Amino acid sequence: MEDLFFIITERCEGMPSYIYPGKICYMKENRYLSEVSQESKVLPVKWLGSFIEYLVQVDSLHPLSKVEAALLQALDTEEERLDAFLNKVALEAAAGLKEGSSVFVEEKGKWQQGVVQYIGSRSRMLFPDCTSGTFFRIKLQDGSGEIWAPFPCVKPASETPVQAGDRVIFFPNNEIHARRGMVMELKEINGEKLAFISTDKNEQGEKGGSVTVPLGFVLKEEYHPSDVGLMDTDAGTGPVNSSSVSLNSRVRVHFGKGAVYGTVRWIGSLPGLDGTRVGLELDTKTGVGDGQFKEVRYFTCPSKQGMFVKMSSCFPDIPYSGTGDTLISSFPKQTTQGCDADTESENVPPISSEDVKHMLVGRMKGIQGHCNSCYMDSALFSLFSCSSVLDSLLFKPADPKDQPIQRTLLLDIVNPLRRRGFVEAGSVMRLRKQLQERGYCPTFTTDEKDPEEFLSLIMNKILSLEPPIKLCSGNRVQSSFCYQIFLDEPHNLILPTVQQLIEQSFYSGHLKLAEVPSCLILQMPRFGKNFKMFPKIIPSLELDITGLLSEVPQQCLLCGGLASLECKECFQDSAFSRNGFKYFCQTCSTQVHSHPSRGSHKPSPSFVPEGWSQAVAPPRDVMEMFAVLCIDTSHYVSFLKYGPNTTDWAFFDSMSDREGESDGYNIPEVRLCPEVGRYLEMPLPELACLQPREMDDVAKRLFCDAYMYLYQSPNAYLYH
């Protein structure tokens, strides 16, 4: 269950004197939902790094993302955190920085240029980022060394050309707060490039003003647009022809967290606001109301799907048609040639767990299958619909000859999937043709392939992604994009979990992980596509990989303290709760190996970091499942694990209605399958005795036909 993070923004009546605004706290999501459903006035939260609960008034708490909480936690005082939190633009800019970004960093009152080498905790081995805070380690450009800094001391250096007339955000030399304006003139004085900016507000917060700023401290606003408090924004990059925005037309609006899409329901003037305003009904619940403004109703829509914006903030969206049972013959044919970068190339975020039900579920949803494409449809749907763990594939620099393939993947497949919940068959065929024309395989447009063959081609040969899996065997380290589980005979697994399978495979192969992978793709043990080693495999919703990691501190299996010994002979000892790597502290190891049956065991020293306190329990590294690919009679389907509950599952089949196909085209479908949760909660003896024919059809495919499990690290988003 995920943690939700908050910052205390104000003192409320009755609040204890030791609770200050700027304090960062958290609570479990399920606990939060339970409290909110009971309309509680206070929430039981914990300070970061503490296990003690405090009751804090709901009105004084403001939600934070995990990334924001970690950035703010790096500051020393609550006052600094609150001040930095209120500077939304700088916080967003810092959250967008990546390793390799060019920045300016403040050291002893002087700003110097450098490059980000690392983003995360200064003691990641000891504490997660949200406890000790996210810092930036920056290599100075003048070669004088490296420094660590929290985000208020780091400013992005402009990496895109700024021109006169551009809307920008900028950081005045002696300020950490970002401001906004328009570039009126670019000039060079004594070798220094400067931008003369007409500011939206001056230093006193009044409208108007001007300032001259070094060009390196200026960024185009389109790359760092602001959030909008009341969903009323001045961040439009230019007015559009008013004839293109009319009642019931489709539009998009850009905000700090990406673009939102909706339908125009009202156009006119609002009291107290200048200019023409547009009332939108959004596709998702990312708005602020239901069509009312200051208690006057202007249109009607579902709660939290309504918003009012300036006309100049609206951009026409490509219309689309078609519902449920018919093929979408008028769906726009996107191309990779001549695309407008402003309208097509943005990073559309994955579909959130809250939006899956109304955006992704139904017939003609997902990716439309055509001509043996199910392996590719299922793989792309699993990787990109609700996860961004491999989004770097879409934006990393590619070889010029492979850029069309990357653009097709982004513009024709991933963006439409996340924006509308549907990708037409022609888009996937375009990708297949490009792969075939590049000479990677002469049968990409006709024959079925294995998902791992396709993924390896895209990630390795075409886009040269750094393999996420680093395997240690002795002194050798090998890299891989996915891991095939192999099991030596004999083993005592009958109804295994994925956790047991990977532990048994690593134990048999004498393998360890060199580091926590951002994405872990596991292939289940099979002999070919048809012969399955196990009739059923139980999905592990979380994968504890702590024991699989090389050179990290481990917990004692019995007391939970710091382990100093590992016993490989105890791996399959039935006296313990489950198979797996066994680590013990010295005291518990002596007790365990005093038993006559273990007298011959030879525990070996396990890794203990220098200076690690015996009183500090080592952290656990856990990966989260987000998708599963299954195969039955050469047909691939996929499952999404889209939410925190055991019932939050969705099933995708790109060829669900083959009788409705025309010239090889099929009707794809996504449907919810909460019944999976019932089997996950079933006692193991009962599940083991259950015959496949007695299981619900969809759930049976997950348990009996699993081919590939996809896991992601919850910390990947803090570091990448």
Image: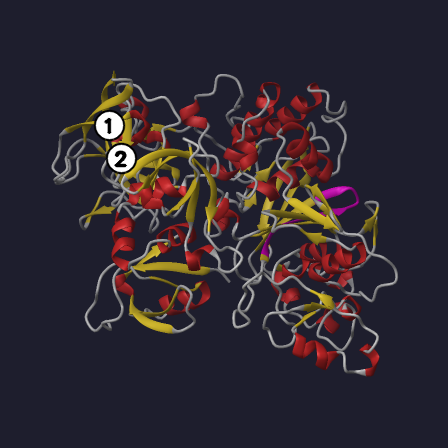
Q: Residue sitting at 51 percent across and 55 percent down?
A: 124
The question of residue 627 being in magenta is answered with yes
Residue 665 is at least partly visible in this image? no
Image quadrant in which you'd find residue 77 = bottom left
The question of residue 635 being in magenta is answered with yes
Give the total of numbered labels. 2
Q: Element at badge 2?
A: loop
Identify which residue, 664 or 82, lies in the foreground: 82
Contact check, label 1 and label 2, Cβ < 8 Å? yes
Magenta-tinted stretch:
623-636
User: Counting other residues with Cα less than 10 Å from the Cα at mark 2, is it few (<14), some (14-19), or many (20 or more)?
Assistant: many
Tell me the kind of residue under disc 1. Answer: Val
Q: Which mark is residue 171?
A: 2
The mark that comes first in sequence, 1 or 2, is: 2
Residue 607 is at least partly visible in this image? yes
Q: x and y percent of residue 262 in the render?
A: 37, 37
Q: x and y percent of residue 239 in the render?
A: 27, 24
Q: x and y percent of residue 195 in the render?
A: 25, 23
- Vertical placement of 325 versus 644: above or below? above
Q: Element at badge 1?
A: strand
